[in-house]
Image (tube, helix red, strand yellow):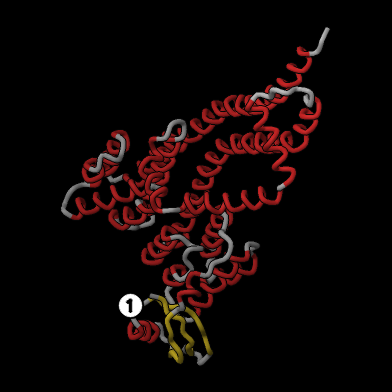
Amino acid sequence: MEFIYEALNKQGQPVTGKVTAENMAEANEKLRGAGVIATKVEPVKEGAKKKRGKKVPLADMSMFSRQFAAMLEAGIPVTQALSTLASQTTHQTLANSVRTIAEDVEGGAALSDAFRNQRPVFTDLFCSMVAAGEIGGMLDKTLVAMSNQLHKDKQLKDAIKSATSYPKMVGGMALVISVVMIIFMVPMFKEMAATVEDINPITQLIYDLSDSMRAHWYFYIVGIIIAIFVLRFVIKSPPVQNFWENHKMKFPLIGELLTKTILARFCRIFATLLAGGVTAVKALETAGPTSGSKLVANAVTNAIEQIENGKTIHEALDETKMFPPMLISMIAIGEEAGTLPSMLDKVAEFYEEDVSVLSKNLSTTLEPLMTMLLGVVVGFLLIALYLPIFQASTAMPS
């Protein structure tokens, strides 16, 4: 758990910060070990712990990592580097977190503990890399590796976003066009077909919907808002989330894209941690949960047990039946040659290239389908509206 403290440093100056410990006694012991005299120590309140600002974009996190690494490499002290970055960072949430980290470190906290106190702004992966760099004395190098990892993450997310942006746009256009036609165009068509007595059921349904939307528009707005909240609640509910997690890699069109995105992220994170000096088991403990798939995370957890019992990494991962043969073979070669981090990087690059190609193919496939859907929706409405007019014209005496 986390504790917030007020203390006096070796120069007798008041300092504040946070420290992670199992209990109050351990917190006080850590502070004494850091050379500060605690005047007040209390647990962080749950509400304060959960409080968070806006999510920090990956681009900003990547830039922060690279700048921090450059300043450390130039010989600037950690606290000075953090204070400078906090004043220069434009994203307020990141700036506040970095400023707090600088205060915690100045107060005697370990850098890795100070970063952990700022979760979820800084992820478990980021904190693990800082801890590894701190222990191994190569913090600048691990921060550069972290920056590269965040940059690759952004590229993967951008690829998926690019593939799904057009369908979202066309779906939104279809909805807007339908609403505009029903509210503004249907009354005009209804007036032109006023002489027709036998209106077909579909056209009559559109007439009734138009009258209802025009007369009770406020009910529809409230209904849409409620529907959005209900939909968000349903999507985030455990049964739906579990179903998605268990089946998302098998979904038509997007299944292969998601699978390779998850594998690319797993390999890249695993490689980054190993290159940063983290042990294989610790690296897997972070790479599994941060891969983006609970199935992969569970498989990695099972593999860790096998590794601790004496099996090699590739043997343990192979037994889970979750990872493709190509990945297992590359890991085996990397283990045997002692080049596992670089081998995992190569596999990650292979999957990232595949993700880029698949996202472009998905866009190419979906664009005509969504355009066709838009045409079907508009065409259906127009046919339903024109049909009574055709009936009226054919019924007129020649």
Other-residue count near label 1 (Cα within 10 Å), few / some / many at <14 / 14–19 / ≥20 = few
* Residue 275 vertical position relative to residue 23 in the rendered view, above or below: above
- Spot the residue most to the top: 398
Q: Who's the residue at 31% across and 33% down the image? A: 326
Note whether 145 is above or below 394 in the view shown: below
Q: Position of residue 169 (x, y in %)?
A: 64, 37
Residue at 32% over, 44% down: 339
Instruction: Give residue 163's quadrant in the image.
Output: top right
Work out whether residue 82 or residue 38 is closer to the camera in this orientation and state it.
38
Identify the residue position indicated by label 1 in the image. Answer: 22
x then y, percent, for residue 391: 73, 17
Name the element at disc 1. Answer: loop
Identify the residue at the far right of this view: 398
Q: Is residue 395 visible?
A: yes
Question: Residue 80: x and y, percent?
Answer: 56, 73
Relative vertical location of residue 364 with respect to residue 68 in this rendering, above or below: above
In this picture, residue 108 sits left or right of residue 372: left
Q: Quadrant of residue 98?
A: bottom right
Total number of numbered labels?
A: 1
Specify the quadrant that holds the C terminus: top right
Residue nearest the observer in this picture, 42 or 125: 42
* Residue found farthest to the left: 309
Looking at the image, which residue is at 21% across and 54% down?
305
Q: Nearer the viewer, residue 378 or 153?
A: 378
210 sits to left or right of 119: right
Q: Residue at x 63, y 25 (%)?
A: 376
Residue 310 position within the rendered picture, expressed as x and y whole percent measured from the top left:
16, 51
Amino acid type at mark 1: Glu
Q: Quadrant of the N terminus?
A: bottom left
143 over 313 or under it: above or below: below
